[in-house]
Amino acid sequence: MERKTEKNAGSSRNRYRQWATLSLVLLTVAGCAAVGPDYVRPDIKTPAQWDTVAVDADTIGKMDPDTAAAWWHTLDDPVLNRLIDRAATSNLDVKSARSRVREARARRAKSAASQLPGVDATASAKSRRSSGETGSAASSELYSAGFDAGWEIDLFGGVRRSVEAAQADIEAGVEDFNDVMVTLLAEVALNYIDVRTYQARLAVSAKNIDAQQETWEILQTLFQAGMGDALAVDQARYNLESSRAKVPDLKMGLAEAINRLVVLTGQPSENLRRMVAEIRSIPRATLKLAVGVPADLLRRRPDVRRAERELAAQTARVGEAEAARYPTFTLNGSIGWEALSIGNLFSSTSRTSSFGPAFNWPIFDGGALRANVRVQGELQQQALLSYEASVLNAVEEVENALVAYVQEQQKYESLAAATNSARSASDVAVNQYTTGLIGFSDVLDAQRSLLSFEDQLAQSRGAVLSNLVRLYKALGGGWQSFEQPSFSDSSDDRG
C-alpha cells in the first residue's frame, strides 16, 4: 500500500513538472512580438512655406515659444488676462475634457489588468436530504472553501495591443484637452474684443448724437425766431433719430458678448459686468508677427496631435482583432478544502488542488473574426485620412488667418485716413452752411459720412485684433501656458 502511495506521489510530481515546464514555455513564447501591424508615424508632407502673398520675411521667422504659449499678454490688457485665467479653471468644457482623460486612464487600467492573473475566493455549505421513496431518506452535509486562479497567456499579443490602444487613447484625450483650451482662450479673447468694440461704437454714436442734438436745437431756435427754414429742422431731426435708432442694436450686441463671456468663464454675470464696466480702448494689435513654417503645426496644433494619436490607437486595434483569430492558452489552478463536517474542513486530509493549462481556438465562426480584422483595417485607413485632413485644415486656417490679418490692417489704415477727411469735411460743411454757401442737406451728408466712417473704423480696429487672435488660434498657441492637470481620480482634479 505504501509503494502504491509513493508511486502515485511520484506520478503526481512528474505531472506537475510537466505542467510547469509547459507553462514556462508558454510564458517564454508570450514575450514574443504581438501579431498585427506595429505603428509607425506617417510622414505627412507639409508646404515648405506659406503660399499667401501677405507673408514677408519677418512673418516667416520662428515664433517665440513664450509668445505662442501666452499670446494674450501681447495685448497688454489686465482685464483680459483675468478673464483668461478664470476661464481656464472654471469653464465647463475644460472640466468635461479633464473627465474624458480620466475615463481613458481608467480604461487603460482595465485593459492592463488582463495581463495579470485573476484569483477568486470561494466558500460554500450544503445540506442535503435524499427522498424516502428513492433512497434511504438520509441527510448529509458538505463544506468547501478554496481559491481559484486563472491566467490567460498573452501568446499573440491581443492584450498588449489592447493596452497599447488604451495608452494612445489617453494621449489623444490629453490633446483633446489641449485643443479645448486653444479654442476656449481664443473665444474668450474674441468676445472680450467684441465687448470693447461695441463700447467704442456706442461711444462714437453718443458723441455724434450729442452733436446732432445740438445742431437740431440750434436750427429749431433759429426757425422759431424766423431766421431758419422748416426743411432744415426736419432734416436735422430725422438725422438725429436715425443715429439714435442704431443704439439699441449696439447695446444688444454688447449684452450678447458679455453673456457669452459669462458662460465661457463660468462666473456670475454681475461679477463680469463689473469687470468690463470701466470702458477701455480696444487693445492695440502687434503689427509684425513671426509665424514659423507650416511644419511647426504638426507639433504645436493639438487637433493634429490628437488625430495622430487616434491613428496610433486604431493601428493597435488592428493587431488586437488579428490576435483574436489565434488560439488562447490559460493557466488554471485551484487549492481548497472539502469536508463533511465543519470541524474537519481545514484538516490535512480534506485538502484538494488542481493545476493545468487550457486551450481554446475558434475553428469556425462564419468568418466573423476575419471580417473584424478588415473592419479595424478600414477604420485605421479612415484614421490616417483624418490625420492627413487635419494637417491640410491646419495649413488652410493659418493661410486664411494670415490674409485676413494683413488685409484688415490695410483696411484700417484706409478707414483712418477716410475718417480724418470726413471729419474735416463735416467742419467745412457746417461753416459753409452758416455763411449760406450750401444747403443743410450737404451738412447732413457730411455728418452721416463722418458717423459711418468712425463706426467702420471702430469695427475695423476690433477686426484687426480679432484676426490676430484667430491667427494665434490657427497656429495652435495658448495651451502650453497652462500646466496639464494630473487627470487623477482625486476630488481636487475634479475642481
Image (cartoon, rainbow, N blue to C red):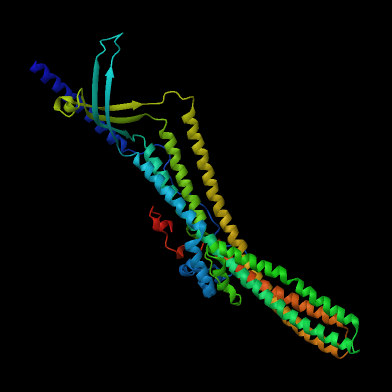
Q: Quadrant of residue 332?
A: top left
Q: In the image, residue 241 lies at what x, y percent?
A: 79, 75
In the foreground, 272 or 393: 272
Q: 133 above or below 283? A: above
Residue at left 14%, top 22%?
A: 9
Residue at left 31%, top 30%?
A: 330
Q: Is residue 9 left or right of residue 189?
A: left
Number of numbered labels in the structure image: 0
Residue at far bottom of view: 435
Residue at far left of view: 2
Locate the N terminus by quadrant: top left
Q: In the image, residue 251 lies at what x, y percent?
A: 68, 70
Q: In the image, residue 295 lies at what x, y percent?
A: 51, 59
Q: Is residue 32 left or right of residue 387?
A: left
Locate the C terminus by quadrant: bottom left
Q: Is residue 469 left or right of residue 24?
A: right
Q: 330 above or below 452? A: above
Q: Is residue 289 left or right of residue 315?
A: right
